[in-house]
Amino acid sequence: MSSALMTVLYDGGCPMCSREILHYQKIAGDRPIRWLDVTLQATDMKPYGLTVEEALRSFHVVPPEGPMKAGASAFVTLWSELPYYHWLAKVILATGTLPWLEAIYVRFAKWHFKRRCASGTCGLPPSGEGS
């Protein structure tokens, strides 16, 4: 595990997402991870090169050593730092299944964003729904 800070950008307004992040926070212990809820009004996404809408469309992780990861790759990056999940990250990377998982995640994320934001419940105006 790296001693530098990893940043996790997540949708704190999504009940499912919040439960999952709470689980990760509990098992992370004192690992150097910053958990950033992108739905908070004070959250500025500019340092990450994202708009709030882009941050809500996909799960993002900024590892200390490299570029931002999004989607399934972001989950694998986070899992590699967590107890109980680091083995799963290794299996996914070793078996070459990440592209397959990414394809599934992209479909899910698009559906989830549309469902959550179409009515404006994600904090974006309904016109911000996009395609």
Image (tube, rainbow, N blue to C red):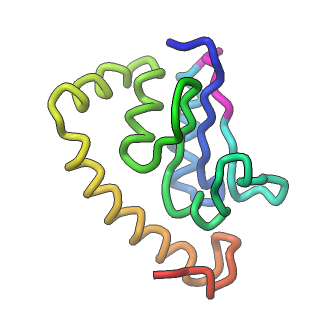
Kindly indicate the quadrant of the structure image that contains residue 85: top left
- Residue positioned 50% across, 50% down in the render: 59
The location of residue 32, given as percent across then percent down, is 64, 20
Total numbered labels:
0
Magenta residues (range): 29-34
| Residue 31 lies in the magenta stretch | yes
- Quick check: 58 left or right of 64? left
Q: Compared with residue 48, is residue 84 higher up or lower down, i.e. above or below? A: above
Q: Compared with residue 47, is residue 32 higher up or lower down, i.e. above or below? A: above
- Residue positioned 38% across, 34% down in the render: 76
The location of residue 60, given as percent across then percent down, is 53, 46
The location of residue 109, given as percent across then percent down, is 41, 62
- Residue positioned 44% across, 41% down in the render: 74
Report the predominant secondary structure element of the magenta stretch. Answer: loop
- Residue positioned 15% across, 30% down in the render: 95
Kindly indicate the quadrant of the structure image that contains residue 25: top right
Q: Residue furthest left?
A: 95
| Residue 13 lies in the magenta stretch | no
Q: Compared with residue 67, is residue 40 higher up or lower down, i.e. above or below? A: below
Which one is nearer the viewer's eye here, 46 or 41? 46
- Quick check: 71 left or right of 64? left
Q: Quadrant of the C terminus?
A: bottom left
The location of residue 81, given as percent across then percent down, is 47, 21
Which one is nearer the viewer's eye here, 54 or 10? 54
Q: Residue furthest bottom?
A: 127
